Image (cartoon, helix red, strand yellow):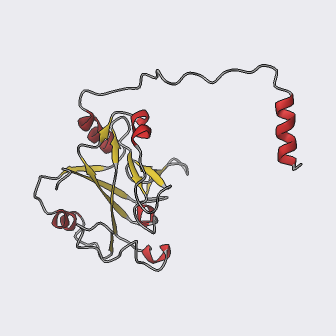
Amino acid sequence: MSSKEDILKRYRANIQQRFDMPDLSDIRATTYAEPLVQFIKMSEAVGGQVIEVDKGRDVNTLIRQLYPDAQQIASNLPEITIATRNPDTVASAEALNGTDVGIIRGQLGVAENGCIWVPQTMREKAVCFISENLVILLSRHNIVNNMHEAYRSIRFDSVYDGYGTFISGPSKTADIAQVLVMGAQAARSVTVLLMDDDH
């Protein structure tokens, strides 16, 4: 028996009272009259930018306008024609280093905290974190009220099933000397492009 198993065995032997798991079927989570409006408000509160894209507007032109100095743009989305790198075809994750703008698709947004669920739909998921600026395309019709609804809605339907992450605004930390640093662990900026499903 390993030391870990031995320790766990000792803990179990000394349990004095056992409790049933709580019933979680009746959780009354927060809901919103207008989840989309709340999502935009929370996304901006955490430092993100949200742009509602009119139907028919060219998303490539919009991204170029937002990031005119970007040299390296990474995306595997078929509608993104301005990409200079493809996270599906690069030799390794390291090849995405120096990406100015990464463009990915979010599956759903969460109104209560501005989070976006991003399943891995690319071979090298590093594009989600190594890009200086991150652009997330998100359907305006895929906004849920809260994390309870989000977890019930998550689905994996790509060849890279099994990995996903919630992203909420740019990376930031104020751990050191209480100085806010943007882009400490991931993107310095996050822009959400809210689009129609048939854009």
Q: Indicate the position of residue 55 as horizontal and vertical percent values.
A: 11, 53
Q: Is residue 117 above or below residue 144?
A: below
Relative horizontal placement of residue 151, taking residue 75 as reference (left or right): right
| Residue drawn 48% across the image and 73% down it | 93
Relative horizontal placement of residue 163, taking residue 7 as reference (left or right): left
Q: Indicate the position of residue 75 as horizontal and vertical percent values.
A: 33, 68
Q: How many marks?
A: 0
| Residue drawn 43% across the image and 33% down it | 148
Residue 110 sits in quarter: top left
Most extreme residue toward the left, as rendered? Answer: 56
Q: Quadrant of the C terminus?
A: bottom left
Q: Indicate the position of residue 48 as horizontal and vertical percent values.
A: 32, 49
Front-most of residues 124 and 96: 124
Relative horizontal placement of residue 158, taking residue 24 as reference (left or right): left
Q: Indicate the position of residue 152 as horizontal and vertical percent values.
A: 42, 38
| Residue drawn 41% across the image and 45% down it | 154
Front-most of residues 114 and 87: 87
| Residue drawn 40% across the image and 77% down it | 89
Q: Is residue 38 above or below residue 121?
A: above
Most extreme residue toward the bottom, as rendered? Answer: 91
Q: Is residue 72 above or below residue 192?
A: below
Residue 186 sits in quarter: bottom left
